[in-house]
Image: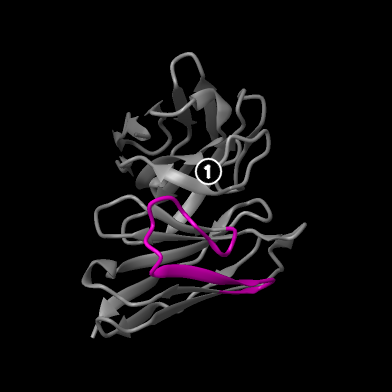
Amino acid sequence: EVQLVETGGGLVQPGRSLKLSCVASGFTFSSYWMYWIRQAPGKGLEWVSSINTDGGSTYYPDSVKGRFTISRDNAENTVYLQMNSLRSEDTATYYCAKDVGNFMYTTGVMDAWGQGASVTVSS
Amino acid sequence: DIVLTQSPALAVSLGQRATISCKTNQNVDYYGNSYMHWYQQKPGQQPKLLIYLASNLASGIPARFSGRGSGTDFTLTIDPVEADDTATYYCQQSRNLPNTFGAGTKLELK
């Protein structure tokens, strides 16, 4: 059974940093693109980041580019999201997700999601 | 960025058909595939993949769910609707970065 478990959320002051982790099990982690997606309270879904199978290619929307960094450790079956210079608008539940296919390219289809980690940015 | 437009809410009777639409401001087709996907999210839960590449049923999803469309117009159909289907449904495109989602359609029972 595929499982994704996010940890590392919490309350943080504006301008500070936080690092989320997502531990994967039940599939060959190193063969799949991975994603972070967030959802502000009462709002819709926003894609935050993508990373390819070996970690050599990463992608971000403009809203987090330069502040967030995705990385992965295939030996530990873990994907990370380092969040710097946090803002109040970054307050959200952060989900990690896996790609539906074990391809070298991304399909952008997210077929398994973790339960989410809550991040609150407030003074 | 590709913008996805969904109606905010839909009310349907048990056993009837629900049709949820998603329109994009750019074509999301590429080399014979439509990069449009559908997710279901219930309150307090993570999203669940229902349909990918416009019409492919995700693993473990009942055949009551179906998707169709191409180009800029897509629909998710639930037939027949069951009580457990009350949720918010999101469309998502992965034709271009940034991946974008619709604002969601909340399905309620009459």
Residue B45 forms part of the magenta stretch: no
Residues B70 and A73: in front is: B70
Left or right: B71 with respect to A92?
Answer: right
Residue A75 versus residue B44 in the image, above or below: above
Can residue B43 be seen here? The reply is yes
Q: Quadrant of the C terminus of chain B?
A: bottom left
Q: Position of residue B101 (x, y in %)?
A: 52, 60
> Which residues fall within the magenta stretch?
B53-74
Can residue B104 be seen here? The reply is no
What residue is shown with label 1?
Answer: A100
Residues B58 and B3: in front is: B58
Q: Quadrant of the N terminus of chain B?
A: bottom right
Residue B79 versus residue A82 in the image, above or below: below
Q: Residue at the spot x=49%, y=47% of the render?
A: A110
The amino acid type of the residue labelled 1 equals: Val
Residues B57 and A56: in front is: B57
Q: Position of residue B2 (x, y in %)?
A: 65, 63
Q: Position of residue A48 (x, y in %)?
A: 52, 44
Q: Residue furthest right?
A: B31
Residue A60 versus residue B100 in the image, above or below: above
Residue B60 forms part of the magenta stretch: yes
Image coloring type: one colour
Residues A73 and B85: in front is: B85
Q: Quadrant of residue B9?
A: bottom left
Q: Residue at the spot x=54%, y=25% of the render?
A: A71
Q: Position of residue B72 (x, y in %)?
A: 66, 73
The numbered mark 1 sits on a residue in which chain?
A: A
